[in-house]
Amino acid sequence: MSKLVIVGTVAFDAIETPFGKTDKILGGAATYIGLAASQFEADGAIVSVVGGDFPQQYIDMFRAKGMNVDGLEIIQEGKTFFWSGKYRNDMNSRDTLVTELNVLENFDPKVPPNYTDAEVVMLGNLHPLVQLSVIRQMSNPKLIVLDTMNFWMDNTLKELLEVIAEVDVITINDEEARQLTGEYSLVVAAREIMKKGPRFVVIKKGEHGALLFHQNDVFFAPALPLEEVFDPTGAGDTFAGGFTGYLAKTGDYSYENMKNAIIYGAALASFCVERFGTERLVDLQAPEVRKRLRQFQQLTQFDIELT
Amino acid sequence: MSKLVIVGTVAFDAIETPFGKTDKILGGAATYIGLAASQFEADGAIVSVVGGDFPQQYIDMFRAKGMNVDGLEIIQEGKTFFWSGKYRNDMNSRDTLVTELNVLENFDPKVPPNYTDAEVVMLGNLHPLVQLSVIRQMSNPKLIVLDTMNFWMDNTLKELLEVIAEVDVITINDEEARQLTGEYSLVVAAREIMKKGPRFVVIKKGEHGALLFHQNDVFFAPALPLEEVFDPTGAGDTFAGGFTGYLAKTGDYSYENMKNAIIYGAALASFCVERFGTERLVDLQAPEVRKRLRQFQQLTQFDIELT
């Protein structure tokens, strides 16, 4: 069991999908990552910032899930980051309606002293300089995992490349991998990204699953085919939380073990999308997760004997 | 080892991709299906029609691959079906430049007498009435597999539904599954298609792999991530030929064995796209196939123990 540091947003989201809409509900990358990682009883710390409007009940919930919140700064006179978005009918694209950075604008992350020795660091999607600041605070990280998005490629590419050079794993979606490298083939794109630093590249393809690249090897985790995707918000972060939570729990950062980790990530993400926001994750029980992992086995395992 | 009847086009194709273009080369659904099935030394018969312009060397090649060509009618005064298409840069879409039906226009398929008792029938993409005619000639088929496309949904839906009602397996791409059912979720679409007749539904997602549905079960075969797709022509037919060739060879039409069959189909399809037309398939050797199957195992097999 290794310690896990999670940096990312803790936010309010207002979401509209073809199935309905929500008021301001709990959201943010660190929230989803933390909830997913808590399935492994990982010794995790959330490093983030919220405003005075952030309900104590959510902080209590993080604690009840075993998350350390000493690094969750509360700026009483400020307001919590707010995002609002609306999904189109196919659920594969969405329009951002509102983004209010609020307290996030001057976020200066502080890793709690007893977590600066954590082995696993999950850098949720944030300004690259914030991610870099967290890396600088770690004394002996064994596995740094980076999530990012096209916004930072467009606006802060130099800083982003600095971060990329220092991490072990990058998670990125297919379009972003193509944008970052100018290569259409994901195999070629992943190879180019590895040249920039990371030893492992995870390319997320949404409903089409995720690919894990390492050296000349590649592993594929499908997304579970679902009758209905209710709300995709947080699925990528849940995937990252399952991935890093499992790795922190096992303390094994080999490629072979990462295969299991991305299956766990895909399994947890398949729950996330079944309800609005964090609703499904908050109550998720271990037997449900085991049952879903069995579905992943049935979905992918075959029995061809090769001589 | 069961007999396999393959009905489909045998054609000339002229193909243009970002990598180059061909003159008239050997193509057609039955050609790709037959070449893929020949990897299993299946006792297969090709039922099709060509014109007097069709080179004897291709017919000799089919024979050398162990294919029976007694049902390959030659209309000396006619011309072979010709298709020409151009792929766009992403290789996922193509424009048809020329379609000359020629001898295909009045194709009246005749299954050779010693193949009417075949257990496995592969109905390549053709007019539904032609497919129906082949079904009517079979004395005791155990597994009828249907491939079709949106063109027949648009123009001959009534006849297509008649065929669908009589087959065991349908292979269809994701957009066609949605069109046929009006359902966006592929899980729901597959269930609706099963209500129309087939006990098994294979939904092809191109570079995103293929799903096999049966009752409440689902299995997923990924496409092998490739550095470069040279020419996608025939990949779907190669997939179908690997699928039915393996099933005919094993004579086991269970859901469990179909999982292996779609992995074989995906493996052979991954070769097809590496060169123009049938070029890669014609020379494909068994050790190469075994090596690729090992790649599929490494791509998908993981080791999570569940209590």
Image: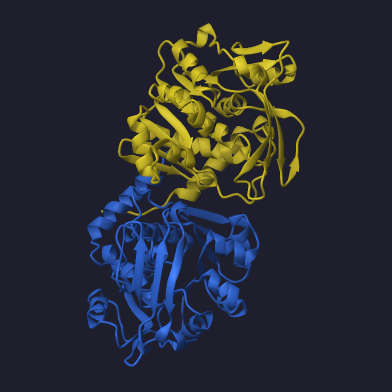
Chain colours: A blue, B yellow
Viewer-proximal residue among A197 and B221: B221
Quadrant housing residue A18: bottom left
Image coordinates for residue B9, horizontal then vertical, percent: 61, 23
Residue B89 vertical placement versus A155 (above, below) = above
Q: Give the percent coordinates (x, y) of residue B166.
A: 39, 21
Q: Is any part of residue A228 visible from this angle?
A: yes
At x 53% / y 65%, what residue is drawn? A200
Residue B153 vs residue B45, the one in the foreground: B153
Residue at far top of view? B113
The vertical placement of A282 against A305, above or below, is: below
Q: Tell me if residue A304 can be seen.
A: no
Q: Which residue does the image show at 63% across and 68% down from the upper left?
A: A195
Q: Position of residue B264 (x, y in %)?
A: 51, 36
Report whether B299 appears left or right of B13: left
Picture quadrant where residue A36 is located: bottom left
Indicate the position of residue A127 as horizontal and vertical percent values: 50, 80
What is the residue that sits farthest to the bottom in this orientation? Answer: A77
> Does residue A48 appear to the left or right of B240 in the view shown?
left
Q: Is residue B31 above or below residue B176?
A: above
Q: How many marks?
A: 0
The image quarter in which residue A158 lies: bottom right
Q: Nearer the viewer, residue B152 or A140?
A: B152
Q: Quadrant of the N terminus of chain A?
A: bottom left
